[in-house]
Image (tube, grey):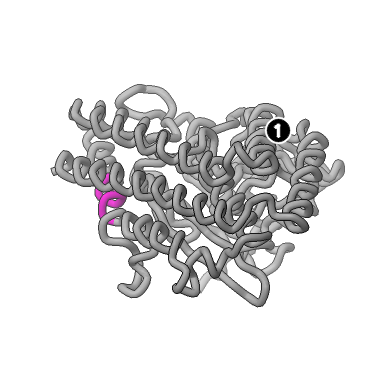
Amino acid sequence: MKKKSAPKSVSTDVPLLVPGYKQFGGRQVEAAALRNVLAHLGIVAPHTGEPFTDALLFGLGGGIGLSYFVYASGDFTSLFLATRITTSPTGFVETMCTRIGAKATIQTASTSAAAEKKLKQALAEGRPPILWVDPGDFYYGTPAAYHTLVVYGFDESLDEVHIADCSDRPITLTHAELTRARQSGDVRKFPALLVDTPRPIRLPALKTAVTQGLRDCCGQMQKGFGPANFRSNFGLKALEKWAGLLINPKDPRGWPKFFPRGPKLYQALVSVFDQVENRGSGGSAFRELYADFLVEAGEILSKPKFDGVAKQFRESARLWGALSAALLPDEVPLFKETKQLTVKKRLLFEKEGAAARDEAKTLSARLEGIRVQVEKTFPMSEAEVQDLLTDVRQHVLAIHAVEKQAVKTLESLIG
């Protein structure tokens, strides 16, 4: 039996750069990363003859979703709010690839050295890999869940790794920064995805893929995800659960007990705001992005009534924006400033990329100062906190009502 030959070693004497790569930016990191790679490969959508939009890819992967989880360990508490459909860590991008007929190869590694070797090999072959990372402090502070980027160059002599992300500009990281980002937080086994150039997808196959993506979204929003005892943490039921916990003083995971007035409450409010508004360009929990997908889906499926459902999700996007505003009310100056600074950091990154690092650090320092100030003297009374949580609850229930109807309408149109 013939032995498999070991991968050839890659010379580090010359920079490794994917020839002709020039795709940057996007609205949702995973869809944008795949869109950028596909555009680099010259792949176009059959209904337009143009590169796939990140809105269409986002919808093909299953689109929006909702999950709500809180976590406590000692004095530490945290809140995770997923705003797209829940999948395995790499499953969202893999599903997008499958539905456009592209072969996706997932690579993992047990050590950083092995991961780096595979990265260099891909670049030497002219293949820009998609990596999962925890962006940490070298970015504007984006909520780290399911963050991906594209690597298109590695110059070891200059200690430069060239990446494409949701910024409109190229970004350069050091080798150490990329390595740290690939093995911290929730990132495990250094996952990377390589896309093989697919055959052009034909319109009938794209119609089927769009319908599958729509059904995935409706199914998870209505039925939840995973074992039965966890399903209330997903989809429409998660919104109901969250609304109840916001004002429940008896439940140990209700906000009055789990996030009492003080530092824990402040961190929870900032965390939700950040996850809704700053996880992708445009904010509003990806609802505006999904509405754009629905318009495009209606064109692909020749179903003009999808425009009406898109309007429902644009209303949901508006309500998510109103919820974000209510979380950190303008009437509290420190809360208002927190909102402004976190959004400013995201916008700086999107427009200026790595050039905004110094200004982003200044903004981060001010945010840390606000956190310390709030920890010393919380700027709301107990009665005001109760009013705040009651108000937030009403916003969550309003979102639930609109999305429940929107999903029902969408399901009826899919057929």
Instruction: Give the percent coordinates (x, y) of residue 35.
Output: 48, 36
Examine the structure image and report whether residue 290 is included in the region drawn in magenta.
no
Range of residues picked out in magenta: 214-219
Q: Which residue is mark 1?
A: 353
The amino acid type, in three-letter code, at marker 1 is Gly
Is 409 rendered above or below residue 113? above
**Residue situated in front as seen by the camera: 245 or 340:** 245
Q: Residue at the right extreme? A: 157
Work out whether residue 5 can be spotted.
Answer: no
Q: Secondary structure at mark 1?
A: helix
Instruction: Give the percent coordinates (x, y) of residue 306.
Output: 23, 31
On screen, residue 270 versus residue 401, left or right, reads: right
Q: Residue at x 40, y 53 (%)?
A: 66
Is 92 rendered above or below residue 356? below
Is 91 rendered above or below residue 158? below
Work out whether residue 411 can be spotted.
Answer: yes
